[in-house]
Amino acid sequence: MPGADSQAILQFLRRCYEENGSRGGLWNFFGNSVTKRIFIEDQPDLLVEVREGIETHFLRAKNVRETADHAEIYRKERDLIYATVFVTGWVERFESKPEPVCAPLFFYPARLEIDPGMEHGGNLTIDVANRRLNAAVVAAIGGEEFLRKIEDGTENHALTEGCVGTVRREFAENFPASDVETLLTYPTLRGESELREAFRAVKSDPNAPLKLLPVGAVALVNKSTEMRGVLNELEEMAGPGGELSPPVRALLDGRASGAQKVSRGRIPAHLSAAQEKIIDSACEHPLTLAVGPPGTGKSFTIAALAIGALSRGGSVIIASKMDHAVNVAGDKIESAIGLENAVIRGGRKEYWRKLKSFLEDLLGGVFSDDKRTWKEICKLNSKLDSLEKKIRKLEKRTLKRISNEKKWGTVLSQEAENWWQKWRRNAVLKRVSAIPPVRNPVGVLYQSTSRQVDDTLEFLQKSRTFYLSDRLSKHRPSFQAFSRAIRARTGTKQEEYFSSVDWAHVLAALPVWLVNLSDVHKILPLAEHFDLAIIDEATQCDIASALPVLQRANRAVITGDPKQLRHLSFLPILRQAELGQEFGLDAEQRERFNFRNVSLLDLASEQIHDQDRVAFLNEHFRSRPEIIEFSNREFYAGQLHVMTGRHAEDSVVKAKSPLRVTQVEGASRSEAGTNKAEADAIFAELIEVCEKQNSTGEPLSIGILSPFRNQVDFLRHRLADSHLANTLLHRHSLLIGTAHTFQGEERDLVFISLAIDNCSPSASFRFLEKPDVFNVAVTRARQLNHVFHSFDKARLAPDSLVGKYLSWAHEVDIGGHRVESPAAAPGQHEHDEFANEVAEFLRGIGAEVHIGYPLAGTVVDIVYTVDGVSRGIDLVGYPGAFEDAFPLERVLTFQRADLQIYPLAYSEWHFRRKDCETWIRDLHLDEEKEVAGKKPEKIPTNSAE
């Protein structure tokens, strides 16, 4: 029996997504998911002032400061909203029994700020551009058709009396028994007591009618996603006659065809082999998978993909469920090319404002004065082609020179015992005397690669301004229609304006878009307009919510890490099975498209059948080697090349091990699941950090992580009561949360509170052992990871993951372990006369010297440090372990690890040693001059983010 087709699979995923989401939402404003409520009583709805141009309101209430503090502390888990127009009554939620609800019909993101000197109040700003209809509640009350009527009858932004009147009429017509009379007094708002009384009346009477009340309130609510856009677009994709994009087809049926192959473009940075593989695959295939463990430059890779597409006149949409992920990529793109407005951010109020303002400037002629022609762009492109040819020739010449140096080194390393050997030595001397030192041609090669980056940057900037000016001058009506569309007050009007936009021209001028998966429908129509879609943190993304973004592109790159946190689903197993049967999925399909257990990254890995389309980012840029080493061995088979071996640390942590373990004596976990003693110990450390930094120097960022929610809440309350709260939150960017809070985040210092004690139940210990949670928890720190625990290690199982980590961390803490490569084992270089002579000279000028230093998965011949600056020397020609020169790709790898490599040939050392010693001494002075006159860096470097 054949399985379901693509349309049926889409319908199945849509229903799974809908039913999974229906179990969240804002249903009870007085429930536990809503805190810090501030009601606006006996005055007009604040939205009236917004319509009149007043966007900031002074909110007078005794708990305003507390609410603002909690909004900052809980910013990862909760949103501050302004809610208005409430409904009470009995509502049946997805095949469940009716239950009493007290819910706002509309709510808006809000921001609360307390200026110095303010008492009993603060400034409230309401983001009217991102109004949300409480769609799950409205659909549960009256069904999909009723929901559409409410959506069509209300504007997208600030409510008006007319909009509220439409709501009142629709309820009255569809539910004649409902009480809508109180809504006639809108915009004057009723108070908290009246809303509570209405809800009490509903709960006491299962036959109570629906009631609408004009109530407004500010509150903190648990974060949720907006589902309507995803549901509507999945329905459209599953409709008859719909053409699915190549990435969607590749995910649903494994077909790897239909994507148009493109050139790789130009990128102003040096990439690793894995990054090059991702770029090449993304230009050719409909679906590419990039696996990025913690701190391996995933965001840098995303930026490189986007810049490559931009350079060839293409367009890219970058999406994630996490705003932080796409924002980091966007920042890297703009810093790389040195141009603002190359990246369009969609969703939040500040992004909408920036986009609207940019379009106003665009249409007003601000960017239309560029007279650059296409011929000039082609000339720049030809210049880069010529430079690439030159670099290839220089590489060949350098390889030839290195080959000669190896031959000469063999001759010079042997005693001249007969006339033939003496003749050969003299021949080498004549040859070496007649040519420049090896550092000269190698230096020309390095300079050419650096100039290639600079010229690529110039090409990007000029081609970007050309496309912008050219498309605007030739296709102004499309930009006018787009500007009207993003200002439209109804979805119907927006669709009308979108239909008259020629997206090929708009995306040529505005090529890179960043969106949250749930927001894309607000700013872009569902059509295959983009050359490339990139979805980040795909392990945390369900399949359904990603498909509408992928439908908008010709090719896609899926990025994430299967060893980190996965998406959460509340869909019951039995209900998922029923839906699979309803839509005709066979057993294999039900397993492959398992909504609960299969992430987008899992599905991509399953459906890609060609290993050339899968790449593993293996260069780690975030943490000190000791911090990442455990996860590298335990989760990544030792394949991560650590690029941070020579990074200097802050003086606050310089004297400490990068890994510390503290067993808190006498500590215990309370019945409430909190551990006060561990919290006390952590805050003592925080006080020490604050005192040492004390408003001077670059502040260290700080994170506090606990696997247990109750301990996290306890730590947050402790912070709210601390006199250091403001300093920690704003100067040190303090983040407190579980591993889920920290996914995608990093901090200089991370303190981990394991919270449980010897008497804690076995289930608590098993929870600590979850590999994905544990891996995230121990890889967030850059400079210091400090673990606090209150149990004896004997309480752990023999093969315990936590036990192995604590043993490792303790060994590092007491100085018993140094992370190094097997290639750097003692004795490897003890007979290398050349290496020892150079090292002896370097020590003589006061350098700290390491021969055979492990870095980035290989060994640097010599690494030495003078005045806090580390450099590397590539020894060339002397027979032995260090005979070969590093290829250009490896030198660029070391540069990404912030280590400059200088070549030194044995023939030069043998015949012109004094010149070589002078050159090495002068390196320090030359670098000081270079740094003093250096322009601000604009080229992106790989980093942990």
Image (cartoon, rainbow, N blue to C red):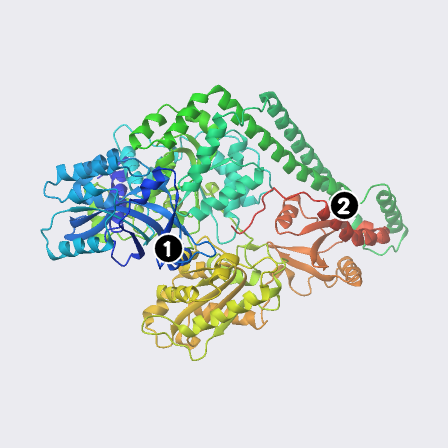
Give the CA separation, mark 2 to mark 1.
55 Å
The image quarter in which residue 72 lies: bottom left
Position of 457 with respect to 278 (left or right) is: right
Asked if residue 797 can be seen in this view, the reply is no
Position in image of residue 210 (x %, y %): 14, 47
Query: Vertically, is 204 above or below 612?
Result: below
Query: Vertically, is 328 above or below 362?
Result: below
The image quarter in which residue 490 lies: top left
Name the amino acid, label 1: Glu
Q: Residue at x 64, y 44 (%)?
A: 936
- Dot 1 surroundings within 10 Å: few (below 14), some, or many (20 or more)? some
Q: Earlier in the sequence, mark 2 or mark 1?
A: 1
Secondary element under disc 2, as helix, strand or loop, is: helix
Residue ID for mark 2: 439
Query: Vertically, is 145 above or below 274?
Result: above
Residue ID for mark 1: 77
The image quarter in which residue 651 lies: bottom right
